[in-house]
Image (spheres, rainbow, N blue to C red):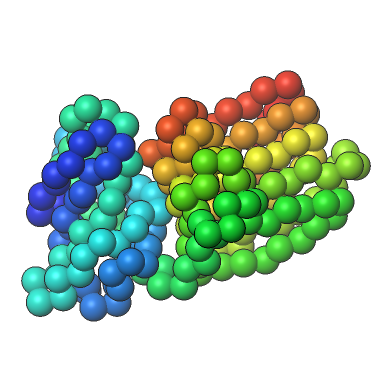
Amino acid sequence: TGQHGVSGSAGAYSCILNVTNASIFETGRYCLIADATGSSGEGHAVYNGCWEVTDVDAANSRITITNTDRNSSFSGGSIDGGTIKALNTVIDFSDADTDGFTFGDYGYLRIRNVALVSTSTSGKCFNMHGNSAGAHHLVADLNVGVNGWHYALFMYGDFAQCEGLTISNASVYGVCVRRRGWVRARYLIVTGCGSHGVYLTDGGYL
């Protein structure tokens, strides 16, 4: 319902938000923000994403989240509304320092209502590298948040369909599509990544 305060620096901001019901959130878990609205240009859009919840103040209906906006001054502007969902189911791949889900030909995954996180600087959350052009992969069904990783979604010469995927804080690319790969996505949010939000090369298509 609004912004209470912001502190921190580029790539590591801490944002206190007023919410309708803080009791559904848990410290150390994650949240999804979409459809942010505000009165200061488009700056409020940087709030959209999958962010870690670092503090919950249920008594005052406030939560504190991270935000990896890369600008030297926080560009969030004035947020006055949006949709925020608690993702209290978290799969953390950080200790393994590896890829999350690797797809071969005709791999299929249906997943929803979960945060997939990693501090890896080399791993890919979704690594799609089939051997046959035209292989189909359904990656995300609904309310899937991805935070961290080296690449969040990597597609090489293949086809993927995903829906409801929110990507934030990839160290390099949020989405990388190469070698005539094709990703068909609906309701895709990509924010706060280190190099490119979306990188298409060698005939990659989104």
Q: In this view, does 184 lie to the left or right of 156?
A: left
Comparing 100 with 155, the one in front is 100
Residue that appears at 58% across and 41% down = 122
Residue 150 x, y percent position in the rendering:
54, 40
Identify the residue at image location x=18%, y=41%. Answer: 8
Give the quadrant of the N terminus. bottom left
> Above or below — where is 173 with respect to 3?
above
Quarter of the rendering containing residue 69: top left
Q: Residue furthest top?
A: 202
Vertical side of 6 occupied by 197: above or below:
above
The answer to whether residue 196 is left or right of residue 64 is right
Q: Which residue is drawn at 52% across and 66% down?
A: 91
Comparing 200 with 117, the one in front is: 117
The image quarter in which residue 17 lies = bottom left
Quadrant of the image containing the C terminus? top right
Q: In which quarter of the image is residue 45?
A: top left
In this rendering, the count of numbered labels is 0
Percent position of residue 134, x then y: 86, 42
Pinpoint residue 19: horizontal percent, then vertical percent.
20, 65
Q: Nearer the viewer, residue 101 or 139?
A: 101
> Going 41% across and 68% down the picture, which residue do you hit?
87
Q: Where is residue 188 in the image (x, y as percent from the top left)?
A: 52, 46
In screen coordinates, is 59 left or right of 1?
left
Q: From this viewpoint, is residue 164 visible?
A: no
Residue 182 visible to the viewer: yes
